[in-house]
Amino acid sequence: MKLASRVERIEPFWVMEMAKAAREVAAGPACDPALGGEPMIYLNIGEPDFTASAPVQAAAQACLQAGHTAYTQATGLPALRSAISGWYAQRFGLDIAPERILVTAGASAALQLVCLALFEAGDEVLMPDPCYPCNRHFVTAAGGQARLLPCGPEQRFQLDAAGVEAAWTPATRGVVLASPSNPTGTSIDPAEMGRIVQAVRARGGVTVVDEIYLGLSYDERFGHSALAHGEHGDDVISVNSFSKYFSMTGWRLGWVVLPPALVPAVEKLAQNLYICASSLAQHAALACFTDESIAEYERRRGEFQRRRDVVLTGLERIGLKVPVAPDGAFYAWADCSAFSPSSWDFCHGLLHSAHVALTPGRDFGPAAAERYLRLSYASSMMHLTQALQRLERDLHG
């Protein structure tokens, strides 16, 4: 069967290939405790080990019992859009009109809708290298070209305004950023974000910021939304999600904040592509914003920060240097070049010897793909401690 050419332009999702390899090893005798083996420890997937809060679970059950499972508007439940608006006011001091907020089938759907609405063949979109692979693939699927700009530790692995200005060409349509970032856990300084927005605005471009980890910021300096830099509050696009801070990964629910003029176009695309986000997930998500839920999410944020500190100390001791400490999300971007010239081979080796699943840098861009690996500390403290002990044992005897 002849495939569309866009399929060839999208690389495999290597994170998932590594996950498949980890499951295969985990199913073997070396990982069977009954045979004296070590169970696999998975530090390769960015999924919190926490589930939805108790109020959210109760709200979902009530929704089912009441039969509130019909289609919603493509833009989402009005009550949920208002609740998200209230969260921006309470958390970030921002006045975001509910009418600018569209509820989507996860942040992935939000990014896809934005890319389809804004980018087409011949358009170039600037992104940092390293970056989350799916974000650049959304640009590719829309017909555009993601242009990756290598960003090292001196830039916090993030784009800066000077880099954007130097790389801009007549074909450039805008930038897609992520703050905090996957895979590095690093954020863009708010002052630098403002300079980037100004540089893009001056060139008639668009600034799209993936903020799905913004709720999991550990440093007050970085815990600010890029929406604060929008001219009149409406010319920066922010994508967010209920998956990470709100621990609702499998519920597939997110949102996007749009300029008012873009809302009808994105709504039309949503109507045609998936009708609406899950009504069950939307009704349940209303309970995310109760005092009880927020208190629980803040407790979990503190726990992630404690895990980060343990992981950074352990990796430093082992010799897996983390050049820039993550200030958000739950990832450490570690340099493994002291042990191997290939992070791919290094991670596969540890899969078999230490029974610890890590993610090699191949997914996140070519600039340092062989030098870095990503460790996700979205796992229990017990598993993190055991994993660090195994890594030290295998790398230092």
Image (cartoon, rainbow, N blue to C red):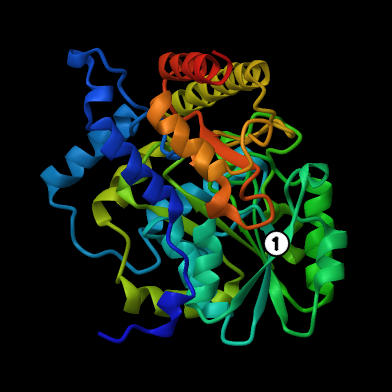
Question: Residue sitting at 73 percent across and 47 percent down?
Answer: 157
Image quarter where the C terminus lies is top right
Image quarter where the N terminus lies is bottom left
Q: Which picture quadrant has residue 229?
A: bottom right
Q: Is residue 346 placed above or below 276 in the rendered structure?
A: above
Residue 45 in view (yes/no): yes
Question: Residue sitting at 76 percent across and 43 percent down?
Answer: 156
Tell me which amino acid carries mark 1: Gly
Residue 87 in view (yes/no): no
Q: Position of residue 214 (x, y in %)?
A: 59, 42
**Few, some or many C-alpha atoms within 10 Å of disc 1 (few <14, some 14-19, many ≥20)?**
some
Q: Is residue 221 placed above or below 225 in the rendered structure?
A: above
Nearest the eye: 133 or 97: 133
Q: Give the residue number, with chain letter if any, for mark 1.
A: 233
70 left or right of 195? left
Q: Position of residue 64 (x, y in %)?
A: 15, 46
68 left or right of 145? left
Q: Position of residue 319 (x, y in %)?
A: 67, 22
Question: Residue sitting at 43 percent across and 84 percent down?
Answer: 5
Q: Position of residue 20 (x, y in %)?
A: 32, 45
Q: Is residue 11 placed above or below 43 in the rendered structure?
A: below
Nearest the eye: 219 or 263: 219
323 left or right of 329? right
Secondary structure at numbered mark 1: helix
Nearest the eye: 156 or 288: 156
- So how many labels did they put on this image? 1
